[in-house]
Image: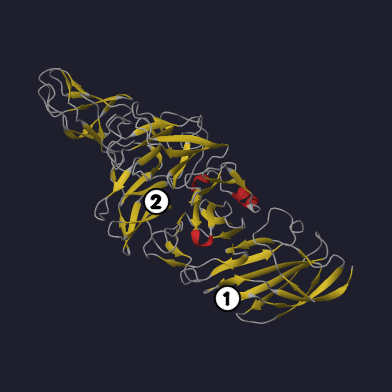
Amino acid sequence: MRIPLDIPPGLVGDDTSFAVAGRWADGSNVRFWRGRPQVVGGWEGLTSELLAGVCRKVFAWTDNAAVLNVAFGAHNALQVWIGGGLHDITPELAQPARALGVDPLSVGEGEATVSVTMAGHGLADGDLVDVSGAANLGGMTPNIEEASVTVIDADHFTYDAMSAAASSATGGGPAVVVAPQAPFGAGAIDGTGGQGYGTGAYSTGAYSSPSSADYFPRTWSLSAFGERLIASPRGGALYAWANDTDAAAAPLANAPAQITASLVSHTDQIFALGCNEEVSGVFNPLCIRHSGVRRADEWITAGHTTAREYVLAGGGRIVGASVAGQFILVWTSDRLFVGTFVGALNQPWRFDPVGEHCGLIGPNAFAVAGSQAVWLAPDLQFRSYALGGAVQIIPCPIRDEMAQNLASAQGDKITATSISIYDEIRFDYPDARDGNENSRYLAVCLGDGSWSKGVMARTAFVDAGPQQDPIGVTPGGQVFWHERGRSADGGAFTWFIESADQLLSEDQTLMVRGLWPDMVGQAGPAALRLSTRLKPQGESRTYGPYPLAPGVERVDVRASGRLFRVRLSGQGSPTGGRIGRPVFDVAPAGMR
């Protein structure tokens, strides 16, 4: 008697093996494509150099000469790969220069101490600033480099000029610029939980000021403004890099000093999401500001500019955002908003809520494929939204393992990406069984809804785009081209797929005598293992592994039972293949 192994696509592992009889139950590094299991592609090194730190974001774009640029945002550095070389473009300064209002300076007669009005300056005693663009003030020049400040309050500070004023005066003119000189510093590698605007609920911790310590790992937003790179570390400033490998990324003048996420819209406007309010300078986790059209340094709301400010309705905080065609998706900790360009001068964009209780667990835990977004919410449910539709929960029959083992306080590290060649969305997450770093992934095929999973440590991932293949980064800073070849950069990698119990006969014990393999494109040896039982909770016996060499026509097996669990696996360099419809040769072995 011949019985084919013809199992529907997708892993179903959140139930007993007998309850999901006839399905695939477990696997690693095997995806489902066009209805059949297929080993994932291999990976090859993009560069032999290691990144400077733990990378949380990778972004690829081309400059005006059509040269591929790949940026990497790590906890302690910003780097770019161009033409085979890795270059350090880490910012030198932590804060942007800021143009002040008209006549923001004052000084007393015979005094050298200058008072400055600068709303929400965010400075501390002893910080250094450069002051430029100021007109004569009381007979002295207030412009200075690296002046040490003394803070009066959140909107005022003082510094000592080079000479005393001949008379009391208030002025400075309309072109005073203050440039804080605090150096750019490394961010946290791990999340620590606790209070503050960076973690937890909106009402937890201080609303108007940052926490005294990092409570989340440093993540980055990366995008392209023309050929320039726009980068912002979470909780930091906005930076631009002008494609010069000898120059560091520089803070964007007049942009908010503290930003949760950033992006560039189809209207050529740079968005800061979760940032300082324009007038008060106070950080508002629901505030959105954007630059003028094609004006990276224009952030002042006025009748002659196209820069504007918005505050989202409701509570929570902005966690992440993405461009979706001509729209902008903004996730808070509880809701999803859609930004629409309406073109009105007073309000060029409108942000409307389209779903509640469907927030984002971490700033990179989403992927957009075409007009559809897929993400992981704080309740560890996967959700999707298609423009014009409603937010939907995506059933995941292998979610429990991830939910039960997600490393504590490390949800901000979760990163999602599309793998467009396979119509797939992949979520890399930190599993506590392996430590605090991303070590495993779940993936869903959007075409048929089938889920797969794997053991593979990647802290950042980006789909093919201007480059031919996806790019992934390991916790140790290795950078790989993915879906290339059949090996782990020349070494071996492991894959397997295992079925749930297959009830071949309800009334009779069967003897499996052999297998007719059905694999196309098999690279390297594979193996078959059978586990059998007579009853769902009965004792299990294991047979094998039996080697499956490429091209072998039949494998002899001797395994008896009523419930059969089938495991196919491989390890090597190369390794891989696509599993079709193998057939078992069985015979009755008696009644039970």
Q: Amino acid at mark 2?
A: Ala
424 versus 548 height, above or below = above
What distance separates the C-alpha of mark 2 from that of mark 1?
A: 37 Å
Q: Which comes sooner in the sequence, label 2 or label 1?
A: 2
Secondary structure beneath disc 2?
strand
User: Is residue 466 at all visible to an observer of this figure?
Assistant: yes
Give above or below for 52 relative to 238: below
* In-image side of 134 versus 538 (left or right): left
Residue 465, placed above or below residue 210: below
Can you tell which of label 2 and label 1 is closer to the viewer?
Answer: 1
Q: Is residue 181 left or right of residue 12?
A: left
In the rendered image, the quadrant that contains the C terminus is: bottom right
Residue 212 picture location, percent across and down: 42, 34
Instruction: Report which quarter residue 97 is drawn in.
Output: top left
Q: Position of residue 269 (x, y in %)?
A: 34, 42
User: Considering depth in this image, is 212 or 300 the residue closer to the camera?
Assistant: 300
Residue 333 visible in the snapshot? no
Which label was assigned to residue 74? 2
Asked if disc 2 and disc 1 are in contact, CB closer than 8 Å, the reply is no
Query: Where residue 170 sits in the image (x, y, percent)?
Result: 18, 20
Query: What's the amino acid at mark 1?
Result: Gln
The residue wearing badge 1 is 522
Residue farthest to the front? 343
- What numbered label is drawn on residue 125? none
Q: Residues within 10 Å of mark 1 (few under 14, many from 20)?
A: many
Circle 1: element type = strand
Q: Residues within 10 Å of mark 2 (few under 14, many from 20)?
A: many
